[in-house]
Amino acid sequence: MREILELLERDAALSHDTVATMVGLPVEEVDARIAEWERTGVIRRHRAVVDWARYEDGGHGVEPAGRGGARVTAFIDVSVSPARGVGFDDVATRISRFDEVRDCYLVSGGHDLRCTVVGPDIRSISDFVSQKLSTIDRVRATATHFVLATHKRDGDSFAEPEPDHRLPVTP
């Protein structure tokens, strides 16, 4: 029932009744499947995509740190020396344990891992990279890219919709 998961991934606020109608199943079956997926970890959590810039400062692009201050997001590319039997997994797992790390992916290309890191300011991210990340065994190099503006996240565009310039049609 991949369709149920795709619907919930697109909009976690959909009611089970609505999902059942959309996939053509009884609501009891949808309830049971969702409960099982939550129990087994297929569904990790339900979340909202928030445009913090609109909430906090009226659209000026500054995101909150959680208790009033701004936060900075960076993508950090990490080059790792692989180890026999574990490849990159043990380093990725260790990096993922840091509170500053929001995402950690094994990627193809010039680096091995790409991490999303959040901190209250550029200095804190710099300190994280130099004091925590780069000191991990087998981390060979890092490249930090600071987010300057968010245009789209998790499939949601943060751009204002284009005004409809069409003439109204009347009967």
Image: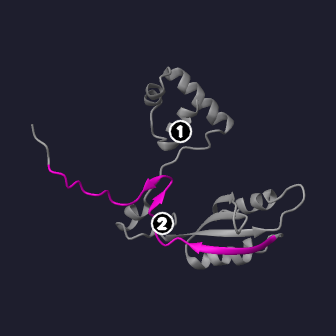
Picture coordinates of residue 13 (x, y %)?
Answer: 45, 40
Residue depicted at 70% across the width and 61% down the height: 108
Picture coordinates of residue 122 (x, y %)?
Answer: 57, 77
Queried whether the magenta region covers residue 161, the answer comes back as yes
The amino acid on which the numbered mark 1 sits, given as a three-letter code, is Glu
* First along the sequence among labels 2 and 1: 1
Q: Name the image quarter holding the N terminus.
A: top right
> Which picture quadrant has residue 44?
top right
Q: Name the image quarter holding the C terminus.
A: top left
Q: Looking at the image, which is closer to me, 52 or 105?
A: 105
- Magenta extent: 139-167
Say which residue label 1 marks: 6
User: Contact, CB < 8 Å: mark 2 with mark 1?
Assistant: no
Above or below, 37 relative to 26 = below
Q: Looking at the image, which is closer to me, 78 or 70?
A: 78
- Image position of 157 (left or right of 41): left
- Image position of 42 (left or right of 66): right
Q: Mark 1: which secondary structure?
A: helix
Above or below, 54 relative to 38 = below
Question: How is the rendered protein coloured?
Answer: one colour
Label 1, residues with CA under 10 Å away: few <14, some 14-19, many ≥20: few
Residue depicted at 37% across the width and 62% down the height: 54
Queried whether the magenta region covers residue 116, the answer comes back as no
Q: Mark 2: which secondary structure?
A: strand
Q: CA distance from mark 2 to mark 1?
A: 29 Å
* Eye-nearest disc, 2 or 1: 1
Residue lying at the far left of the rendered structure = 171
Numbered circle sitting on residue 64: 2
Picture coordinates of residue 156 (x, y %)?
Answer: 44, 53
Label 2, residues with CA under 10 Å away: few <14, some 14-19, many ≥20: some
The amino acid on which the numbered mark 2 sits, given as a three-letter code, is Pro
